[in-house]
Image (cartoon, rainbow, N blue to C red):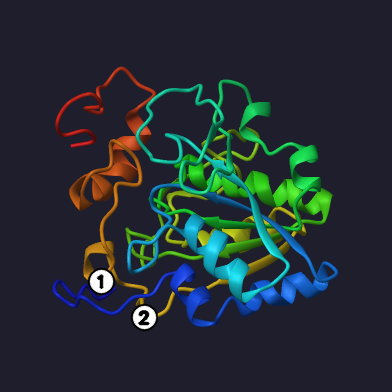
């Protein structure tokens, strides 16, 4: 691994690449689905391009303008809600104020409420996923993506993952491997606590090794080296969760996360959570 402390490299995430390509990959999917593309997006506050424009707005306006027949109809949110500020189990559905599109919350107290329903998926030709990962197995956004892959395999919906760097680099694979017999919303498949993969790589892993077989497209990151920590890139830090506020907490998260089911405090509710 090489860490460039002040490299400040020019890194482009999947949404930037998609824009640069004039949404050509979505145009291909539109033709696949008969000239129209009813689309959903699974995202959060981290889903922005290099100009801090929301992926939601880019798909709703720019993609729809450049790919006639494409329509963004539904927004899906995960843990902590679309703004990443709610710290509760039951997050209600809502409406996006800018687009007036429905926001379907997929974070609830039961397993069923964390999966997209067959009825929701049957109304969509494609779902775009743009979520910043934390690089840790128990981060629920990874599992939300896996649930969409499963649902898409049954409905025939295409999944498009807009990739982002692993903030903990892709150079380390560390920690205990989860038990296949105990799948949950914090452990979808067996892999280590610190997995060293991007969301796009995880999507391919889930889809192939989990024998899901969804139609998957990954729009890759450009300019990122495998040894890069997040603060070695040019990307703006956006808290991926309320308790992940800087790279110190992010770096400690793989270890601290493993003791959170014990009676040891992880510092949540303090000014320095996970530290």
Quickly name the residue at label 2: 223
Residue at the (46%, 47%) spot, across then down: 98
Residue 87 in picture, x, y percent from top left: 37, 27
Instruction: Mark 1: give few (<14), some (14-19) or many (20+) Cα within 10 Å.
Output: some
Q: Which mark is residue 117?
A: none
Residue 93 in picture, x, y percent from top left: 56, 30
In the picture, measured across the screen, residue 249 lies left or right of residue 91, that is left
Which quadrant is home to the C terminus?
top left
In the picture, measured across the screen, residue 37 lies left or right of residue 105, that is right
Residue at the (82%, 50%) spot, across then down: 155
Which quadrant is home to the N terminus?
bottom left
Give the distance between the C-alpha atoms of the residues marked 2 and 1, in whole angstroms. Answer: 10 Å
Q: Nearer the viewer, residue 106 or 177?
A: 106
Residue 157 in picture, x, y percent from top left: 77, 56
Q: Nearer the viewer, residue 28 or 149?
A: 28
Residue 201 seen in render: no
Looking at marks 2 and 1 on the same chain, the residue that comes earlier in the sequence is marked by: 2
Instruction: Report which quarter residue 31 is drawn in.
Output: bottom right
Q: Nearer the viewer, residue 137 or 172?
A: 137
Q: Which mark is residue 234?
A: 1
The vertical placement of 53 against 136, above or below, is: below
Residue at the (66%, 44%) spot, across then down: 147
The vertical placement of 95 against 172, above or below, is: above
The vertical placement of 160 against 239, above or below, is: below
Residue at the (60%, 76%) spot, across then down: 66
Residue 175 in picture, x, y percent from top left: 40, 48
Disc 2 to disc 1: CB gap under 8 Å: yes
Instruction: Report which quarter residue 129 is drawn in.
Output: bottom right
């Amino acid at each position: 691994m090489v860490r460039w402390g002040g490299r400040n490299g020019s890194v482009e995430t999947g949404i930037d690449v998609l824009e640069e390509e004039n949404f050509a990959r979505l145009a291909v999917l539109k033709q696949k689905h008969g000239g129209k593309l009813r689309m959903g997006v699974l995202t959060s506050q981290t889903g922005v391009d290099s100009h801090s424009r929301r992926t939601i707005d880019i798909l709703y306006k720019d993609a729809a303008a450049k790919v006639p027949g494409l329509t963004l109809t539904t927004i899906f949110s995960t843990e902590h809600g679309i703004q990443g500020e709610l710290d509760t189990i039951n997050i209600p559905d809502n409406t996006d104020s800018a687009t007036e599109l429905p926001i379907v919350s997929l974070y609830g107290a039961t397993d069923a409420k964390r999966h997209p329903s067959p009825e929701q998926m049957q109304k969509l030709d494609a779902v775009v996923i743009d979520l910043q990962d934390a690089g840790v197995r128990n981060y629920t956004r990874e599992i939300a993506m896996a649930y969409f892959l499963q649902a898409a395999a049954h409905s025939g919906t295409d999944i498009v993952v807009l990739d982002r760097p692993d903030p903990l680099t892709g150079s380390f694979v560390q920690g205990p491997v989860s038990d296949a017999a105990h799948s949950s919303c914090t452990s979808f498949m067996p892999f280590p606590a610190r997995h060293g993969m991007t969301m796009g790589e995880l999507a391919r892993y889930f889809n192939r090794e989990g024998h899901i077989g969804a139609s998957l497209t990954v729009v890759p990151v450009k300019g990122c080296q495998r040894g890069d920590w997040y603060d070695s890139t040019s990307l703006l830090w956006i808290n991926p969760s309320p308790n992940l506020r800087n790279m110190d907490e992010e770096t400690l998260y793989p270890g601290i996360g493993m003791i959170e089911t014990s009676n040891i405090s992880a510092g949540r509710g303090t000014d320095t959570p996970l530290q």
